[in-house]
Amino acid sequence: MQTAAPSILIVEDEALVATEIELTLRRLGYRIAGSTPNGDEALDLLVNRRPDLALLDINVKGTKNGIDLAHHIRDRHKIPFVFLTAYSDRNTLSAAGQTLPYGYIVKPFNERDLLSAIELALHKHASEKEGDLPGLNKLNGKLANDLTPREYEVLCHLDKGLTYQQVSDELDVSINTVKTYQKSLFAKLGANSRLACLRLVRKLMVLLAMLFCSGLLAQTEAEAEADPYPEMTEVRDRLHSIRRGPDTALIVRTLDTLHKIAEQYGKDEPLGVYHFELARMQMRRGNYAAARADSHTALEYLRGSENYSQISAVHSNLAHYYSPTGNYDKVFEHGQASYEAARKTSDKSIQGDGLNTMAIAKRRMKDPEGAIEYFRRSEKLLEDHGRKFNPIVNLAACFGDLGQHDSTIYYYEKSIEIARAQGVTFRPRLALSLTNFAQYYSSNSQPEKALELAREANVIFSEVGNPNQQLASEHAIANAYEELGQPERALPHLWRARKLVDQIGHLESQVQVYGQMLTSLVKISNNDSINHYLAIYLDYNDSLTVRKRNEAMSEMETRFNLKEKEEEISRLELEEKLSSASLRRQRWIIGLTLAGLAVTGTLLWFVSRQRRRISVQNEIIATSLAEKDTLLKEIHHRVKNNLQIISSLLSLQSNYVEDPTALNALQMGRSRVRSMAIIHQGLYLQDSVTPTIPAKDYLERLTGELLASYAGPETKIELITDFDEVSIDIDRLIPLGLIANELVTNSIKYAYQNRSSGQLWVSLKREHKLTTLRVADDGPGSGQLLTDATDSFGTLLIQTLTKQLQGRLEVSVEKGTDVRVIF
């Protein structure tokens, strides 16, 4: 018995768009349960027609809008529904997300968007009724548990469509190694080809995204009680796995995902966790000022929270972020706060870390005896062998400060032994211990041992990429060469140390590095460089001297104020024994004081009044800006809706046209409208209304859609893109997009006739203030379509828009067609 095609209810307020959707769905084989622009009428159709799925616009007529209908469908009718709307701002998405939709399509849409959203919604709904999603848990488990970090990197690059050579270049491995990783991926995912592998992964990602939107990710009650924010924990685990990887863009996208999830909870604690992770990323980049700022923001959000482990971790990191500034009072303050927060938990490890941080600050404050006390308390608390590394390596440094040679050697060797035993995850700590040990040997006139240790540490730090620690190892190598009387070999390491110290901005280290550079330059008689770096050294040294003088003056002022207060107390005691004349004098002073207070009070009242006036004016300005932002976003929304109507008109007209030339013209018209609609969608999605749009994202989406629309299933076209990170204003991006649309469409139509495969290159490069759009193919040549003699609308459009961009057009047909638009 043949199963009836699914029936679909269309709720759309634009009649032309609704008609296009209806014709498209019928052509795809679906039945139409009804179509209405009114939410109240939709309620009747739901009861009388019993559709299998509903397509909902949000802004519809009647007393019920699309979101109201979605709530009603979910509670009463238990059928899948998909939003189809021009709205894509955060507030609308949040309101729509609360209805747990099965999909969300943003206008203007194409046939593929509609088909994939409907099929996924029907499939998911059917799977829910059966009580299982076939193969999902198994595939999810493979991705989460079976794949190594390197295999996951290869999978991400393959998913981007990169060739073996491109993946090889990105990961700095051979092509054979890439193929070996791919073979391993096939085996673990149960796929027999690259395409099958990517289809499995993409299917999983789509299903997981839908499950996340509808809140259906399974979790036991015990897990929910143990972890109040499971989605954040999942993303944080993913972030920790890629944090040290090469894909910075992937890290940023993962942080953005974490931020969105934190905002969805609507609580302060998740936002505090997000800013904690953001600070860690800033620290990895060497941006300590931003790391400190984000950590303080995290503490503000965590204020009042009982998540003491997280609060302790933020304070601990803040102590490390303040260390490069030389403000060791702040380091100790946050170390102590970390320890106090940790004491409210049962976790001895974070308590020990807090004590360790306090001890480091004590050592920096020239108090090695106090530091040793805290380090030993920390070592006793830390039960795990690996976590004992920090207090042990620091104990070695403290005993070195005190000149106790045997204890220093013992603790350094013990720390290195622990680090080597912990394996690859402890390599950065191993390098830290090696560097400190090297510096100790260098200061005790044993440069050969120092050089050996520092070299090993430098190799590890170069792999890890931490500028602060790499600076220490470069400096240690340079010191060792200086001790060996080889200043010319010390200089290359001092050059690298100079770049690192300027990046970090630690004033004491800058003075130290530049001073040592001058010493080496003097020894090799490099007079030209001496003059240059002497000026820089003196500038840094003066700054350091001024800072130390200011600190000393501040300390003296504090002592003076204390002495002054003591003298004031003595004077008041003496006044109590004075005669009545002295008392009258005191009353006179009190009267003057009261008068001064009255004047001060009047001034404060005046200042307060001015502040209130300024606050009111600021609120008016903020309201005006918000209204302007809303109006501009509404304009982009209207433009998108109107472009959808134009596209629908062209689509409807094409159903009544039989002439191939006219039909092709209508299809090209829809494609051109689509190229402009994508731009307005990009503007609408931005958090703030800005006049520019990233051209890379726009062109990637445009070329991908054109390839999917025009390339037939029998033709395999390899799309090769290379886009610079260029932002272009809308007045230039619209003509550029139309030109790209024409060129890519021409190549697809004419370059691959009677061919089963080929390559298509699309790039956007900016050099010397000139931007070049290039579209090239390896076909027999369609460049004649762009010559002055060609009398086609597409050619006229390309030439006219190139003039509008004040650019020039270059065409080559030697090996296929190669077109460049330079502006």
Image: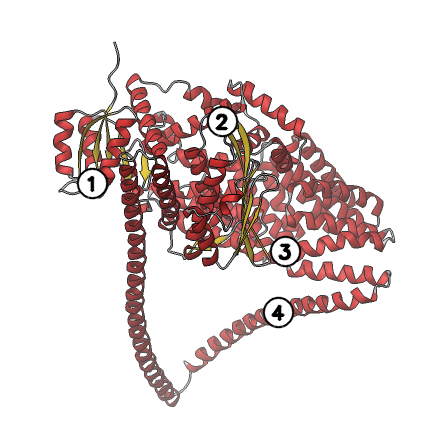
Q: Nearer the viewer, mark 3 or mark 4?
A: 3
Q: Amino acid at mark 1?
A: Ala
In what element is the residue under mark 1?
helix
Mark 2 neighbour density, 10 Å: few (under 14) some (14–19) many (20 or more): many
Q: Nearer the viewer, residue 173 or 437?
A: 173
Mark 3 neighbour density, 10 Å: few (under 14) some (14–19) many (20 or more): some
Please give the name of the residue rendered at 71% of the width and 44% of the height, measured from the top-left corner.
Answer: 396
Q: Nearer the viewer, mark 2 or mark 3?
A: 2
Residue 111 x %, y %: 34, 33
| Earlier sequence position, callout 4 versus callout 1 | 1
Residue 614 x %, y %: 31, 71
C-alpha gap between disc 2 and disc 1: 39 Å
For label 3, the residue is 503
Residue 518 x %, y %: 79, 63
For label 1, the residue is 15
For label 2, the residue is 198
Which numbered circle lies on residue 552? 4
Is residue 533 depicted above or below 265 in this figure? below
C-alpha gap between disc 4 and disc 1: 78 Å
| Earlier sequence position, callout 3 versus callout 1 | 1
Is residue 756 depicted above or below 504 in this figure? above
Is residue 295 depicted above or below 179 in this figure? below
- The quarter holding residue 620 reads bottom left
In what element is the residue under mark 4?
helix
Mark 4 neighbour density, 10 Å: few (under 14) some (14–19) many (20 or more): few
Q: Give the residue furthest to the top.
A: 1
Q: Nearer the viewer, mark 3 or mark 1?
A: 1
Q: Is residue 467 left or right of residue 26?
A: right
Residue 225 x %, y %: 36, 30
C-alpha gap between disc 2 and disc 4: 65 Å
Q: Is residue 696 left or right of residue 812?
A: left
- How many marks overall? 4
